[in-house]
Image: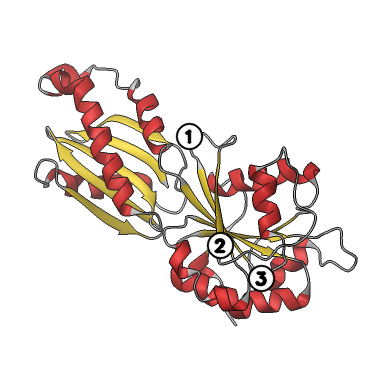
Amino acid sequence: MIRAIHVFKEDRTLFSDVVVGNEDLDNDAVMTLVSSSAKKMQEWKIDSMEIERFRYVYINSHDTQFILTMDRQASLNKVEEALIEMVSRFMTAFEKDLETDDWKTTDFAPFKAGFRKIIGRIPVKVCLAGHGGTGKTTLLELATLPSKGPPQEYVPTFFGDKALLKANFDPYVFSMFDLGGQDRFVQEWGKIIRSGSMVFVVTDSTNDNLAWTRRVAYPVLKNELPYARIIAVANKQDITGALSPETVGKKLGIPAYGMQANQRDFRDRWLGLLRGLAFETIDFKVVRDIEVD
């Protein structure tokens, strides 16, 4: 997931567009560090730098430094391809300005639309993880196939299902993976979840299921997706005896949000959680910080 772009020349910001901000680090200090490294690069050579849960991918062209901020967990190859395309488009539009002093007064704002169009072509990988029967498939259908309505009976997912989701997430498109939750499939999650930016741990809000999640699912997630964002979905809140979202969150050690995935009225809430985690407007945790049993 690409979070932002910054373009510098002679230590001045020509253009920037921050889609999802970074509250963890001093952004000005990071940009100074990365842009100084980019200045030393040969033309069109790409390099990257990892800091905390972010990766900064950069290139130097016409003594102009282009820096993409991305989720460290996301696919580097796709982002490098996107960066090349962005720089090419930028040069097509502004090369003459950059070769003279005209760049000091040029309005680069029109580049925003092209930038956002390019990052919208790289789906953000979303993983629905949890034991079988907790409602992962129902959540996938609730998000992507609302006209059919959520399924009313459980059909085990073989290994994993995938669907693209376009909703009110501009400029992003989500590629959602429903991971098979049977015990024999969990150890195979790593083949599917690489490059995932977000994880939703789906529970049925029972003590037994929460214990399984910590014991079985957490070690795999922590090993494969240490820098991804994670929250819990306390599903099946309509079932007698269901633990409250607050209790689920406390037992799992991550923020938890209540859900009834088999009810179409909960679709807006579900989309809101997806958007909230993507744009970091709700409480979440980073996978590396969760505690495993």
* Three-letter amino acid code of the residue under disc 3: His
Residue drawn where x is 63% and y is 43% of the image: 144
Residue drawn where x is 45% and y is 54% of the image: 24
* Three-letter amino acid code of the residue under disc 1: Pro
**Residue 100: x %, y % from top left:** 10, 19
**Residue 247: x %, y % from top left:** 77, 68
**Where 67 falls versus 111 (above or below)?**
below
Disc 1: which residue: 171
> Which numbered tag is attached to residue 131?
3
Going from the N terminus, do you reach mark 1 or mark 3 first? 3
Q: Are marks 3 and 2 in contact (CB under 8 Å)?
A: no
From the viewer's side, name the closer residue of 6 and 122: 122
Disc 2: which residue: 160
**Residue 271: x %, y % from top left:** 65, 43
**Residue 77: x %, y % from top left:** 29, 51
Residue at the outermost right position: 240
